[in-house]
Amino acid sequence: MAAEKRSASTYIDGRWCDGAAGESFVSTNPATGVALGETVTSSVEQVDQAVASAKAAFEGGEWRSWTPQMRSDVILKLADILEREREPLSRLIASEVGTPVAACRSMQVGGPIEVLRWYATMALKGPRGGYEQALPHYNTPVASGSLLHYEPVGVIACLPAYNYPLNLLVWKLGGALASGCTAVVLPSPQGMWSTLRIMELVDELGLPPGVVNLVTGGPDVGIRLTGHPDVDMVSFTGSDAVGAQVMSQGALGSVSKAVLELGGKSPNIVLPSADISATVAASILRFARNAGQGCAAWSRVLVPEDKVDEFCRLADEFIATVKVGDPLEEDSVVGPVISAAQREKVEGWVAELLESGASWGAGGGRPENLDDGHYVRPGLLRDVDPDHPLADTEFFAPIGMIFGYRDVDHAVELANKSRYGLAGNVFGQLDEAIEVARRIRAGTVTVNGGAGMRPDAPWGGPGRSGVGRELGEDGYAEFFEVKHIQYALAGITKPPGT
């Protein structure tokens, strides 16, 4: 049966229209290689139309008159719609991305619902505790008062990555709607089919025309959107290499603000005070979750030198119990990576490390009896030279590396030996582990596994992991410009120096 072909791939000014690029992209199921659907993509000219629509909606018309309460209500409505569609969305994302459906219900759909409900409260609250805040009086050179007035940035270019198509879209779109911005969405081609369905649900909201727009396509569309002179902020999630290009394009176009959530090679320190046997399962699952397609995966495991053999033995035993299989089967734990090309790239990196002296400490290779699909068995490489470039390369596959350390200072040194700084974890006695966490250069460090993602806490990190933050008050503030209004307390005065 031929895959469904969709020509209406572009949403501009509140209306669906056919893509005009004359090209199409085929979305495939990474578990089977079977096509899910074919999308006729947008033209560069349609990017201009979408941005113009977003700019017009931001600068005047109905959207400008919406109160914080109205914006909060529409965000809650979207959360309710996603709740209604939780099961079909979970199965669609499982089919396109490869996340096991049991995990999709919470990670891929449940998380975005929670984030939207938090953004609904922030629409009422405003950034940093209010849309307008008074500063203390200032007496130099004359007595004066000041107000800090927060205004929405403007037109947001929203570019989510394929690995969490709904999550990453909601992080961007939720902030745009809560703050009063407008948006043009460009999904990754590999998450396009899911995003089209999500946009159909957004269309149910009855937003004013132009508030949310959608274009689809490849690099030419992305270059035009991120470099467009009427885009005020680019919010991008993806690799650090592409992120650097996005920042450059934005600077050339309009010197637009950029919020970039990029890669990671996150350390996972198992302190001497930790029970090794209690850390193995969490460590493996954290770098194998979503087939390793997550920028915060704990892909560098650091254990005391005399515990490496024990950790590898226990890891190998655990990996043997982890089901790698069809993401639509309820008991699957690890699904496929996104494409054959991605698997081949990862296998090439592994081969290079093995040739350089590394070896499998646990798991590895391709799973048996899964001839269809792009599956990679979870594995832990040992004896990797920490100075090898691939020791600090994000694999985006369920492959971790284990390194032995001499003492805690050496563990921290190895943890910080990375161009990335997105996340990390420390296992051990609580007080000691928190002290070590303070020494790790990363935006988020969990202790003993932490807990779930919190919408009210910022996400992002230093180095090649990006610029700015998403979520939390820090992330919400990215959607605003601040205006300083200063007034003399004694009435009209001459400017100083006159």
Image: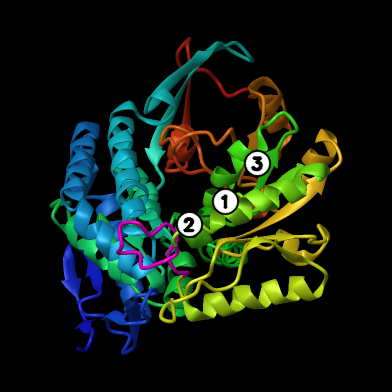
Residue named by callout 2: 322
Residue found at x 69% / y 47%: 311
- Residue at 61% x, 47% y: name it: 422
> What is the C-alpha distance between the residues marked 1 and 3?
20 Å
Which of the 4 image quarters holds residue 201? bottom left
Instruction: Place residue 66 in its image quadrant.
Output: top left
Q: Which label lies toward us, 1 or 3?
A: 1
Residue at position x 45%, y 71% from top?
Answer: 338
Query: Does the CB distance between marks 2 and 3 fall below 8 Å?
Result: no
List x then y, in percent, for residue 288.
53, 56
Q: Amino acid type of disc 3? A: Ala
Main SS, magenta region, reads: loop
> Where does the magenta region start and end?
324-337
- Given residues 165 and 275, the one toward you in this image is 275
Q: What is the quadrant of residue 394 in the picture?
A: bottom right
Q: Mark 1 points at which residue?
A: 284
Query: Is 199 located above or below residue 110 in the figure?
Result: below
Q: Depth check: 295 or 288 in front?
A: 288
Look at the picture and state if 353 lies above or below 243: below
**Callout 1, which amino acid?**
Ile
Q: Which mark is residue 442?
A: 3
Coordinates of residue 286 in the picture (x, y in percent): 54, 49
Residue 471 lies left or right of residue 284; in this view the side is: left
Q: Which of marks 2 and 3 is nearer the N terminus?
A: 2
